[in-house]
Image (cartoon, rainbow, N blue to C red):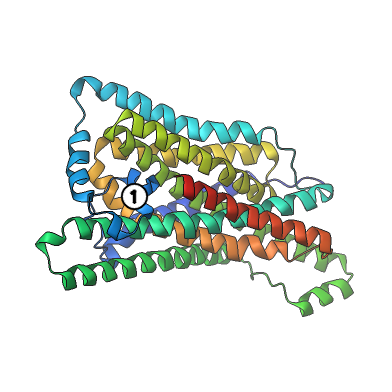
Amino acid sequence: MDRQEIPGKSYKRLIAICLIVIVLFFTLPTLCGAHDGHSHENPSFKYSREANEAPGHQHHHHDHHDHHHEEATVPVGSTMDVWINSLSSTLLISAAPFLILYFIPLDNTDAMQPRLKMLLAFASGGLLGDAFLHLIPHATAGHGDHGHGHSHGHTHDHAHEEGHTHDMSVGLWVLAGIITFLAVEKAVRMMKGGHGHSHSTKETEKLVKDKKTSTKGKVEKQKKEDIQIAGYLNLAADFTHNFTDGLAIGASYLAGNGIGIVTTITILLHEVPHEIGDFAILVKSGCSKKRAMMLQLVTALGALTGNVLALLGSGSGDAAASWVLPFTAGGFIYIATVSVIPELLEGSTKLGQSLREISALLAGVGLMVIIANFE
């Protein structure tokens, strides 16, 4: 089988998709009236152990909160060092997975399909684990600390109501992410004249019985285009995810060099398995190994953008992080459940292969659990 690659003209589609996501990305807060941007937590807080503690264990947060504000004031003489260290760390978390991908033997040939499906299963587990164990919990935990730290100025009922409103807001942003990615995929299919894909038994039987070459060619072409859309959507979601990583690194170095180093190591451990899964999705989308690696490297621009934003003005970064996290989680959930997992239901139905795929999916989730416990 000849290896399929995304045509050069498809880069225009990729740019169009990214622009659509970015426009929605920055206009939805205004349309939905997001009200959780008043959180005083730095984006780096989402990687700290405090973010996962119960509210009862956070009674010292108010004192630490004031202390962090003092630390965030960087002396003029060290500003250059902060920028150099922060940008260097951001480049490190982008380049390290890229180098690891170079040593992974993978392509979209028939011989590689079992291994590719295992990596796709690992990717889906990583995406779901990232969404439910990292992004959503960190989005909800940050506000809980805010409400507790300032409870001396508000009634208990008001704080409880405000916390409930924030939790609902996080849920709405998750749904907004899912619906946005659905709308983008629908729009792309309409522009390409696609009719969607189905995994029903009747359609499968019809394809087996129908041996006309022209019909088979159309079905295979439609399937190939559907897979490519999944690759584009994953790149857009990965860009926003890297954006939050850049915010976290930049804010961490503003708080202190030691905190920045710890945050960088944590994100790196989290990013390597995530990038491997994204790499498998791109290869399945029709990219060659080289092109998939280059596209993964392009998403590093998201991390650099978030990093610079955090360094230039942490306040705007905090406001963005309050809704970027759940929005990205919604995108990950959509990609894992709609684009990746259905691929695991096609092809080989052998028991051994199925068990390996399920084990790989659980490994992806388990790895996110381990990383969450050590953050």
Q: Is residue 129 above or below residue 4?
A: below
In the image, what residue occupies the spot 19% across and 55% down? 149
- The answer to which of 121 and 98 lies nearer the viewer is 121
What is the quadrant of residue 349 in the picture? bottom right
Q: Please rate how many residues cluster around mark 1, counting C-alpha atoms within 10 Å: few if below 14, some from 14 to 19, many from 20.
A: some
Q: Amino acid at mark 1?
A: Glu
Residue drawn 61% across the image and 52% down it: 364
Give percent across and percent down for residue 187: 51, 65
- Is residue 92 positioned above or below 366 on the image? above
The residue pinned by badge 1 equals 50
**Quadrant showing the C terminus:** top left
The residue sitting at 56% across, 67% down in the picture is 190
Residue 345 shows up from this direction = yes
Q: In this image, 287 relative to 75: left or right?
A: right
The secondary structure type at the circle numbered 1 is: helix
Where's residue 69, x and y in %? 19, 40
Towards the viewer: 49 or 131: 49
Residue sitting at the far top: 77
- 291 to 84, vertically: above or below: below
